[in-house]
Amino acid sequence: MAGITSVVMTYPLDITRTRLSVQSSSLGSIRPSSSITPGAPGIPPELPGMFSTMVSIYRNEGGIVALYRGLLPTVLGVAPYVGLNFAVYEHVRKLVTPKGQDHPSALGKLTAGGISGAVAQTVTYPMDVLRRRFQVSFVPY
């Protein structure tokens, strides 16, 4: 529940970050030189900031609902991610803990955490792709 609450509370920031990332990568590919004045004829203007992007999404794309576009696949991906992460971590932790000890070394913990994170992210990656597609679905290019 904590993961879902966290996602719901911060989701407008996440969609804003995604939009700004997409816009900045598109802008870099069409701007011929960084020395040209932004807004000059034929040159795209500079990117808006975080708050103006959020306001623009809110005003032009459907209000508060637009700021939460893609939330469902994100929420559906949180529980499997956390569950897999914990389950795989505990399994690998047992494998890397030396016999006769209760806890693994720092390297063992790092290994268990890395493997568990990789497995959980790999399995839940399709939900992440859906989320990103929903987030950029109304970006004007």
Image: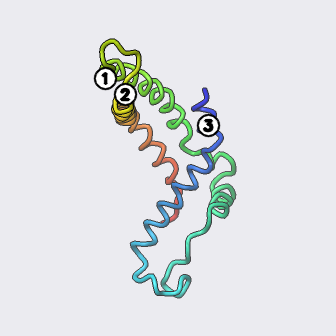
The amino acid type found where label 3 is placed reads Ser
Cα separation, mark 2 vs mark 1, equals: 8 Å
Q: Nearer the viewer, mark 2 or mark 3?
A: 2
Nearer-the-camera pick, 94 or 36: 94
User: Disc 2, disc 1: CB below 8 Å?
Assistant: yes
Above or below, comparing residue 1 to residue 40 in the picture: above
Location of residue 26 by image quarter: bottom left
Cα separation, mark 2 vs mark 3, equals: 31 Å
The amino acid type found where label 1 is placed reads Val
| Residue named by callout 3 | 6
- Look at the numbered disc 3 and give the secondary structure of its residue: helix
In the rendered image, the residue lying farthest to the front is 100
Label at residue 63: none
Taking the spot 36% from the left edge, 35% from the top edge, the residue there is: 114
Label at residue 96: 1
Q: Position of residue 120 (x, y in %)?
A: 39, 31
The colour scheme of the drawn protein is rainbow
Give left or right: position of 34 versus 111: right
Above or below, comparing residue 6 to residue 80 in the picture: below
The amino acid type found where label 2 is placed reads Ser
Above or below, comparing residue 91 to residue 45 in the picture: above
Q: Nearer the viewer, mark 2 or mark 1?
A: 2
Q: Position of residue 115 (x, y in %)?
A: 33, 32
User: Disc 1, disc 3: CB below 8 Å?
Assistant: no
Q: Position of residue 19 (x, y in %)?
A: 53, 58
Q: Position of residue 24 (x, y in %)?
A: 48, 67
Give left or right: position of 27 versus 49: left
Q: Nearer the viewer, mark 1 or mark 3?
A: 1
Taking the spot 65% from the left edge, 57% from the top edge, the residue there is: 54
| Residue named by callout 2 | 105
Taking the spot 54% from the left edge, 87% from the top edge, the residue there is: 40
